[in-house]
Amino acid sequence: MPRAELKPGRQVQEIGAAIVGAWLKLLPASSRILSMDSTDPLTITIDRQIFAVGDTIRLRPEAGRAIGNIRVRTAAAGTAPHSQTLTIEDLNGQPIKYEDDPLDGGDAIPDAVAYADLKRDLKIVLEDIVETGVSVEVHVDEPNLINVVVPQVPRGVLTRGDLIDYLHDYHKYAQGRHYHDELATAVLFGCR
């Protein structure tokens, strides 16, 4: 079912590796929360100086769900080397009174993800893997939306009978893999 052949010497798993590599480049490193200094207003000290006033962030307790829709109200150097003390507010500019799981040992994570850079970089990498003359367009799924791209009919399949023969041959030589499962996996998780 591939729409393009790979360049000589390239392997299909390079596509998956390129996507995972792009995710690793895209996702920020977290900062460890050294202490929760105040709950009203919420003030924490982290182990790196990476945030500026107005940055939107997420806080993730060591055990529990991440807290989002918050931003840095004030940022100052902490007492430990390289540490930073942050006062947190909601997106409306109101200080947060925190009454949930302790944040000590949790993470402070930047909330802005640069998908435009990911799309550009991944396009360059993927176009180097597939045959010359084939254009690649990268789309990033939204959190609650699955973009289904219906693949073209397999190459050389012109009639219903051809498709039945193609599926028969696929199952005959696929060593236990089923075409419908493979196709569903490609739709839900991306072509592999």
Image (spheres, rainbow, N blue to C red):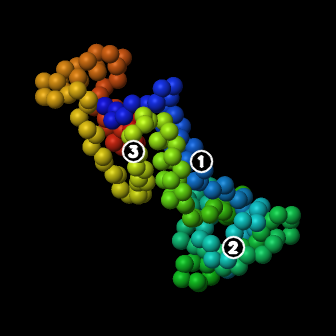
Relative side of 152 to 96, left or right: left
Which residue does the numbered mark 3 point to in the structure image?
135
Q: Nearer the viewer, residue 192 or 77?
A: 192
Secondary structure of residue under mark 1: helix
Q: For the N terminus, which image quadrant?
A: top left
Q: Quadrant of residue 159?
A: top left
Q: Report x, y in % for residue 145.
A: 35, 56
Q: Residue 69 in the image: x percent, y percent? A: 53, 71
Query: Looking at the image, which is closer to me, 175 or 17?
Result: 17
The disc, 3 or 2, on the residue closer to the chain's N-terminal end is 2
**Whether residue 21 can be seen here:** yes
Q: Can residue 36 be seen from the camera position used here?
A: no
Between the residue at mark 3 and the residue at mark 1, the CA separation in whole angstroms equals 24 Å
How many numbered marks does the figure carry? 3
Q: SS of the residue at dot 3?
A: loop
Residue 44, by quadrant, is bottom right
Kind of residue at badge 2 = Ala
Report how far apart the C-alphas of labels 1 and 2 lie in the structure. Answer: 23 Å
Would you say 32 lies left or right of 91 here? right
Please give left or right for residue 136 compared with residue 154 in the image: right
Crowding at mark 3 (Cα within 10 Å: few <14, some 14-19, many 20+): few
List the residue tagged with mark 2: 52
- The tag on residue 43 is none
Q: In this rendering, is residue 166 above or below 119?
A: above
For mark 2, does the 10 Å Cα neighbourhood hold few (<14), some (14 to 19), or many (20 or more) residues? some
Mark 1 vs mark 2: which is more N-terminal?
1
In the rendered image of this protein, does residue 26 appear above or below residue 161?
Answer: below
Would you name the residue on which mark 1 appears? 24
